[in-house]
Image: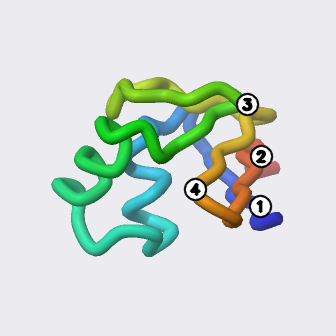
Amino acid sequence: MRNIEITEEYIELYKVLKFENLVASGGEAKHVIAEGHIRVNGDIETRKRKKIFPGDVVELGDITIRILVKA
């Protein structure tokens, strides 16, 4: 499991995929999300701008990312 630390209150889902280099571009991130390949906290998520907060877990295939607050 990867951990990502954010300094803001939340981060949008497509940015998580883009910043972690799981996709090549924001457009690809939006496509992967729209196709239902992403799970947030165990549920399929199709909203590209879904707000991801510290404590949330994002999954793409066998890659799992946990969002943490940066101290």
- What is the CA distance from the residue labelled 3 to the residue labelled 4? 12 Å
- What is the CA distance from the residue labelled 4 to the residue labelled 1? 14 Å
Q: What residue type is labelled 2?
A: Leu
Q: Which amino acid does label 3 sit on?
A: Asn
* Residue assigned mark 1: 3
Looking at the image, tell me whether mark 3 or mark 4 is earlier in sequence order.
3
Looking at the image, tell me whether mark 4 or mark 1 is earlier in sequence order.
1
Residue furthest to the left in view is 27
Where on the picture, by quarter, is residue 25?
bottom left
The label nearer to you, 2 versus 3, is 3
Name above or below for residue 46 compared with residue 5: above
The kind of secondary structure element at disc 4 is strand
Q: Residue at x 24, y 48 (%)?
A: 31
Classify the position of the N terminus by image quarter: bottom right
Categorize mark 2 by other alpha carbons within 10 Å: few (<14), some (14-19), many (20+): some
Looking at the image, tell me whether mark 2 or mark 1 is earlier in sequence order.
1
Where on the picture, by quarter, is residue 12?
top left
Q: Which mark is residue 60?
A: 4
Q: Residue 41 carries which label?
A: 3
What colour scheme does the image use? rainbow
The kind of secondary structure element at disc 2 is strand
Q: Are circles 3 and 1 on residues that touch, CB within 8 Å?
A: no
* Residue assigned mark 2: 68
Q: Which amino acid does label 4 sit on?
A: Leu
Left or right: where 13 falls relative to 28: right
